[in-house]
Image: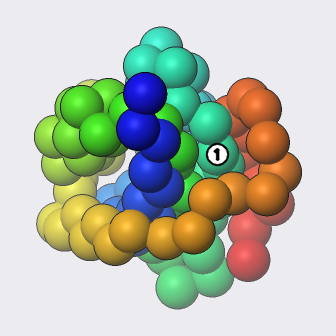
Amino acid sequence: MTKICWLFRITGRVQGVGYRAWFEREATARGLTGWVRNRIDGSVEATACGAPEALAELQALARRGPPAARVDAVQCTQTPADPAGAGFRCLPTA
């Protein structure tokens, strides 16, 4: 299996609406590893690693987000593998 990693930057009303927990659940359900965190600028940032098909699904879902969110944009760029390893987790705001 080919494993790649993407860095996501999601903007809009994505803080205070459960976006991080929702993103973590969606990524875990697709067998992805990585992390998600709020940014001080009001965006959400995440790294997700796994099969290209699973990442494409997550990207499509990220454009909608959970019901209370309003997503304005999702930027994805390929990034080196996450050295932290297995699982998906929420990190503190950066």
The residue sitting at the top extreme is 29
- Compared with residue 80, is residue 1 higher up or lower down, i.e. above or below? above
Q: Residues within 10 Å of mark 1 (few under 14, many from 20)?
A: many
What residue is rendered at 24% in x and 31% in y? 53
**Quadrant in the rendering for residue 67:** top left
What residue is disc 1 on? 34
Q: Quadrant of the N terminus?
A: top left
Q: Which residue is most to the front? A: 1
Q: Amino acid at mark 1?
A: Gly
Q: Nearer the viewer, residue 60 or 6?
A: 6
Direction from residue 68 to residue 36 in the image, left or right:
right
Count of labels in the image: 1
Q: Can you give x and y, in whole percent of width and height, for residue 26 in the image?
A: 43, 24
SS at circle 1? strand
Task: Identify whether 30 is placed above or below 6.
Answer: above
Against 38, is 33 above or below?
A: above
Give me the residue at 51% from left, 47% from top: 48
Front residue of 41 and 81: 81
**Left or right side of 14 for 67:** left
Q: Quadrant of residue 52?
A: top left
Query: For the C terminus, which image quadrant?
Result: bottom right
Q: Is residue 84 visible?
A: yes
* Above or below for 73 versus 56: below
Q: Is residue 13 left or right of residue 27?
A: left
- Report the residue at 17% width, 66% height from top: 72
Q: Position of residue 4 (x, y in %)?
A: 44, 50
> Left or right: 29 with respect to 11?
right
Percent x, y of residue 89: 74, 39
Q: Let me know if residue 22 appears in the view.
A: no
